[in-house]
Amino acid sequence: MVAANGPAEVRLRNAESENCHLEVQYRSNAGQEDIQHRLMESLIKRSFVRVIATPAYSRNAVYIYVQEMTDRGGLLACSINAACLALITSGVELNFTVAAVHCIMTEDSAMILDPDHKQMKLARTSFTFVFDSIAKNMVTSYVHGSFTYEEYEKVVSVCREAVEKIFNFYRKVSQNITKVVTDDS
């Protein structure tokens, strides 16, 4: 579950004269804080720093709150996609949108997109890539495990193709929001 708030007044110590202050808070379902959660916050924040139209919100803050409900694999990709949808629906001005894809590679070099919890146990390597909506350039990547350069290039290519489905979903959500707003007025 993700919520996005902003622009909001920022504390003086966090104020940036040229840019918007972005703060990400990640809470696990167990309520325990550890280094993994700080890493998640950092990766989510890094993925959205260039997304938010920062000059439009200089000396303001945008907050993204992520509450983990359950982890069935691909938690980082799910959190980034949910955060992007939260920003879209909250009306925060964005330069572009981003979408994340999670993929694993098994011991026999088979690739599995969006693996479930059982398939995650077969992973030799886990990949999470974040792409922008403009040119499908990679914004963030998080990789855990061993792989060759050729395997990496192949996974990036497959994930870049798969991300289009997520962007199409964003478009449908945006159209539905626009339709609801125009129908109510």
Image (spheres, rainbow, N blue to C red):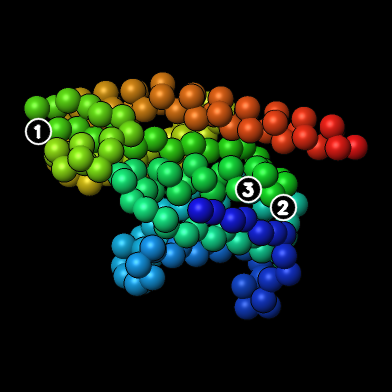
The single residue placed furthest to the left in the displayed view is 108
Disc 2 to disc 1, C-alpha distance: 46 Å
- The mark found on residue 87 in the picture is 3
Q: In the rendered structure, are the residues bearing label 2 and label 1 in contact, judged by CB atoms less than 8 Å apart?
A: no
Residue 90, horizontal then vertical, whole percent: 69, 49
- The mark found on residue 55 in the picture is 2
91 shown above or below 111: below
- Residue flagged by tag 1: what amino acid is it? Glu
Q: How many marks?
A: 3
**Residue corresponding to mark 1:** 107
Q: Residue at x 36, y 28 (%)?
A: 159
Labels 2 and 3: the sequence-earlier one: 2
The single residue placed furthest to the right in the displayed view is 185
* Mark 3 nearby-residue class (10 Å; few <14, some 14–19, many ≥20): many
Q: Residue at x 31, y 67 (%)?
A: 35
Q: In the rendered structure, are the residues bearing label 3 and label 1 in contact, judged by CB atoms less than 8 Å apart?
A: no
Residue 9, horizontal then vertical, whole percent: 73, 69
Q: Is residue 140 visible?
A: no
Labels 2 and 1: the sequence-earlier one: 2
- The mark found on residue 39 in the picture is none
Q: Is residue 107 visible?
A: yes
Circle 2 or circle 1, nearest the eye: 1
- Residue flagged by tag 3: what amino acid is it? Leu
Residue 158 in the figure: left or right of residue 69: left
